[in-house]
Amino acid sequence: MSTVASKSNRDAPVNRTNRTVLIILLLLVLLIAAIFLSYRNAAQAARDEYFMDGEIILVGTTTELDALIQELQTIDDNIILTIDPNRSFSLQDLGSPAEQTLGPQTVASAALQIGSGSAACSQLSSDLEINLYELTGSTDDVEAVLEAIDQTTAGSSVLADANWVIGAPWHPTGSPWHPTGSPWHPTGSDVDQGKPTPATMDDYLEQWAFSTIGLVDAQAVNTGSELARIRVGVFDTSPLESNGPAAASVQESPTQNALKVQIDHPEFINTPVPPEEGSRQDINVANHGYFGTSFIRQLAPASEIELIRVLTKNNRGDLATLNHELLTFMGQANQNGIMTVVNMSLGVPPLEPFRPFEPWLDWEFPPPFELVRQLNSLETVMQIGECLDVVMVAAAGNDSAESLKVSNYPGHWGTVLSVTASNQDNQQSCYANDGDLAAPGGDGGPSDPKAEEPIACEPKLHECVNLGPNCPYSVIGYVHPSTLQSTEAAVTHHNWVGTSFAAPMVTGLAALVRQLNPGLSAAEVRDVIQCGTVKPTTPQEVPVINVARTLACARDLNN
C-alpha cells in the first residue's frame, strides 16, 4: 500500500510538469496564431490602403486586349476579366478633331514618352482603350492575375496596372493626417491644429498670397469680351458629398454657388475602404476641391470651371475613376473645340514601411505585396492630354518634413506642371515637396526665418484666427455652405494650408494665359509661366509665380 502511494506521489510532479508544458505550448500556439492573424489582418488593411481588391486596369488596342483575355483563359480558366463599362474609355470617344491628330499606329512604348511634339502623339491609336476589369472568376487575386499577364504573349503589347488608391498628396489613406499625427511632423501634433479655421471675405481679398503673385495685374486684363473661351477641370473632392458609402449622381449648376462653378459627381465612383470611424484619417475634407477652386476663379474670372468629384470626403479615390473622368472631360472639350486646363490637387503617394504590430511594436517590414507601381494607365492619360494640348497642373505633395522631396505622381512627369508651396518670404514651405515652380500655400515653420531655436514643421492654423489676412501659416479660400455645421452657418471663408492650394493658383494663371494668348500650345503655356516666376536670390527661395512677369513673357513669345 505504501509502495503504491509513494509511486503516486512521484508521478504527481511529472503530471504537473507535463500539464505546465502543455499549457505553455498551447499559449505559444495561441500567441503565434494571434501574431499571424494580426499580421494577416494588417496586411489586408495595408493592401486596401494602396489598391482596389479584385480590379485591374489594362491599356491596349481592342485587338490586343481581346487576344490577351483569350490567352489568359487558355492558361487558367479561373481567371475571368469582366469589363466595367462605366470606367473604361476608348480613344474613339474623344471625337473630332482629336481623331485627326491621333495616328493609325497601335500603342507602343514610344507613345508613352513624356514630352511635347507630334511624334509621340502619332503613336497613339484611335483604337486604344483604357479599361477597368473586375476579376469575376475564382482567381481574384490582383497580384496573381498581373503576374499571369506578364507570362502571356499578348501581355507584351498591353500595359497592366492595379487599380491604385489615390488621394491628396499626403499619404496612402488620402486624408491629410498620418496615423501618427500631422502630415509633416513625424512625432505628430494636435489634430485640431490642422483643421481649417474661419476667415472673412475681406481676409480673402487682402491676403498676402494674392499680393505676392500680383493678382491686381490679372484683374486689369480680365476684360471679358476680349478673352478666348477656356474650360478648367478641377479633379478633387466635392462639397456635395453624401454620408452614404456609394456616390449618387449629383450636380450643381454655376448659378447655385458663390464661385459659379459646375459641380459634378460621376455616379460610378468606387469608394475605397473608408477609414475607421473616429480615427485620425476619418476627417471630412469635402470642401478641399471647392476651396482650391476659389483661387482659379480669382485669376481667371471669365473661365468655365467644372469641379469633378474623383475623391471622397476623406480624400480617397481610385485610379480608374480618375483616368475615366480626365479622358471624358478632355474629350468633351476637344469635341467642342475649347481650350482646357486641368488641376489635380491629388497624387499617388510613395509606399511606406509596413508596421503590422503598431502600436505595440514599431517593427518595419516591406509593403505586404510585390506589385510595382508603374502607373502606366495614368501616364498614358497624361500623354493623351499633351496630345490634345491640355495644360496639366498638379500639387507636388506635403511629405518633405518626413524626408521625401520629389513630387508625387502625376506631378513627377514632365508634361505636368508640378507645384510646390511657398511662404511670405518666397521660401519653400517646410512641409512641401520639390516642384517645377511655387505658389503661395502657407507654411508650418517659424514666422521669423531668423529664429534661433528650431520650430517643428507642423500645422499652425489655430494661430490664424486672430492674425487676419496675413497669417503666415495659411492661405484663405471659399467655403461651400453644404460643408458647414449648423453652428458655422455664417462662415464664408477658411484658412487652410498645403500644396493642394498652391496648385490652383498656377492653374488659374495658366487659364488666364490661354484666354489672352489662345495661339500658345500647352508646352508654351508651361514655358511662359516658368519664365515669369520671381527667381530665387538665396538657396532657401524658390521660383514663385508672378502675373505681370508671366504676361510679359507671353507677349515676348508672341512677338
Image (cartoon, rainbow, N blue to C red):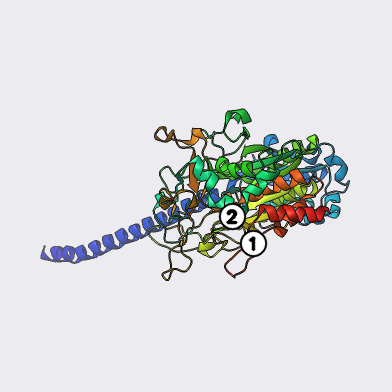
* Secondary structure of the residue carrying numbered label 1: loop
Quadrant (top left/top right/bottom left/bottom right) for the N terminus: bottom left
**Which residue is label 2 attached to?**
212
Asked if residue 109 shows in the view, the reply is no
Q: Distance between the residues labelled 1 and 2?
A: 12 Å
Q: Please indicate, yes or no, whether residue 319 appears anywhere in the rendered image.
A: yes
Nearer to us in this view, 278 or 229: 229
Query: Could you say where residue 242 lies in the image, as x and y percent from the top left?
Result: 51, 33
Give the left or right position of residue 170, taking residue 299 as reference: left
Q: Residue 75 location, x and y as percent?
A: 73, 48
Q: Which amino acid does label 2 sit on?
A: Thr
Residue type at the position of mark 1? Pro
Query: Which residue is tagged 1?
Result: 543
- In percent of the image, x 61 and y 41: which residue is there? 310
* Quadrant (top left/top right/bottom left/bottom right) for the C terminus: bottom right
Q: Where is residue 546 in the image (x, y as percent from the top left)?
A: 65, 55
Q: Nearer the viewer, residue 508 or 340?
A: 508
Q: Nearer the viewer, mark 1 or mark 2?
A: 2
